[in-house]
Amino acid sequence: MTSLELVPLWAGILALGVFMYVLLDGFDLGVGMLFGLRSDPQDRDLMVASVAPVWDFNETWLVLGGVGLMAIFPLAFAIVIPALYFPILVMLLGLVFRGVAFEFREVEGARRWIWDTGFVLGSLAATLMQGVILGNFIQGFEVAGRNFAGSSWDWISPFPLLTGVGLVFGYLLLGATWLVLKTDGELQAWARQMSQRALWGVLAFIVLMSVWTPMSEPRIAERWFSFPNLLWFSPVPVLTAALALTLYRALRSGRELLPFLCAFGLFFLSFTGLVISLWPYIVLPSITLWEAAAEPRAQGFLLVGTMFLLPVILLYVCWSYWVFRGKVRAGHGYHG
């Protein structure tokens, strides 16, 4: 296979890694943020128990995305890291602090309020910074030749910060619908209410981004609204509206699995819209996937191992969620 053929394949693999991370660790982080809005100790323990068996493994996808970017698209990695050093650092510290708090809150004699606060703040910081990183990818980077030419503080601008807030609502939606699926009784009823509130926040963000990005970037406007692209891409907003309505009705009618699946669907359609807007660039506004890619031999060598490892990861993910299916009960969680 030639480099020309491998680059789209690698782009698909990395896109899969990022998408799986956003979905699977997204509801973990969402539960972490919702944790701070619930004061009952038993409900908090149930919330932790709902994600305890799977939360740490979900971050495997983040490793896949980061290592893949460095190995397969080194030029993009060399530009993105200095541009986003601080939000990436805060994100990683948030994930570490969340993980430490997750375990230490169960230690006998521990001051739970400290670790519970760390669990919430770590989840919030990681989510907000992931949204900021996404916003910078959409906004683009200042590049001179093959080097980042901007400031380490360029990430602090309205669009990335707004994207961070939007992702907070998105992860809250994933986390709340996950709790609808995994809990019952009063906690489940509360999770339904939070799901509806988060859904309105997500829809407001989608509408705002759908207006902002075409107005600020003519290339994106041409991609979406020129003919015949308008016909080809019109199912994305139509399906988004249909899924949002289905999710709302499912929450109102007492369904349990359907709201979670609809939330997944909204993220998939949003991710699809992102790919449509950015393709074929990996670093806006000037560097394509092919320009950022490593040499063909390196791509081929790494592909051999990835093609073996990726199915194993997918099978293990499916098996883990199957084993830990069903409702969580008091006294039957990960730690108890």
Image: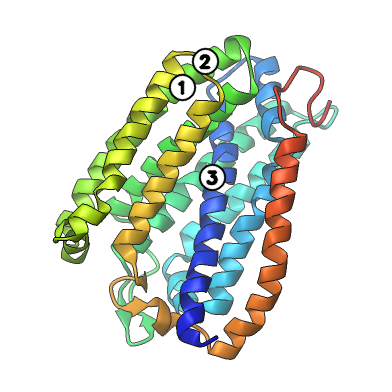
Q: Give whichever of 150, 204 is nearer the camera.
A: 204
Q: Give whichever of 307, 82 is nearer the camera.
A: 307
Image quadrant in which you'd find residue 180: top right
Q: With 223 as the anchor, is 195 left or right in this view?
A: right
Q: With 210 as the anchor, is 69 left or right in this view?
A: right
Instruction: Report x, y in % for residue 241.
Output: 30, 34
Which label's residue is closer to the chain start, 3 or 2?
Answer: 3
| Quadrant containing the N terminus in the rendered view | bottom right
Q: Determine the secondary structure under disc 3.
A: helix
Q: Give whichever of 328, 156 is nearer the camera.
A: 328
Tell which tag, 3 or 2, sits nearer the viewer. 3
Determine if residue 176 is in view: no
Image quadrant in which you'd find residue 80: bottom left
Relative to 184, residue 279 above or below: below
Q: Residue at x 42, y 14 (%)?
A: 252
Residue named by callout 2: 190
How many angstroms separate mark 3 from mark 2 (CA)? 22 Å
How many angstroms separate mark 2 from mark 1 (CA)? 6 Å
Residue named by callout 1: 194
Query: How many residues crowd around disc 1 within 10 Å: few (fewer than 14), some, or many (20 or more)?
Result: some
Relative to 317, residue 256 above or below: above
Instruction: Report x, y in % for residue 245.
Output: 34, 26
Relative to 153, residue 250 above or below: above
Whether residues under marks 2 and 1 lie with C-beta atoms below 8 angstroms apart, the answer is yes
Q: Residue at x 56, y 39 (%)?
A: 29
Amino acid type, residue under disc 2 in the picture: Trp
Which label's residue is closer to the chain start, 3 or 1?
Answer: 3
Disc ID at residue 270: none
Q: Residue at x 44, y 47 (%)?
A: 268
Residue named by callout 3: 23
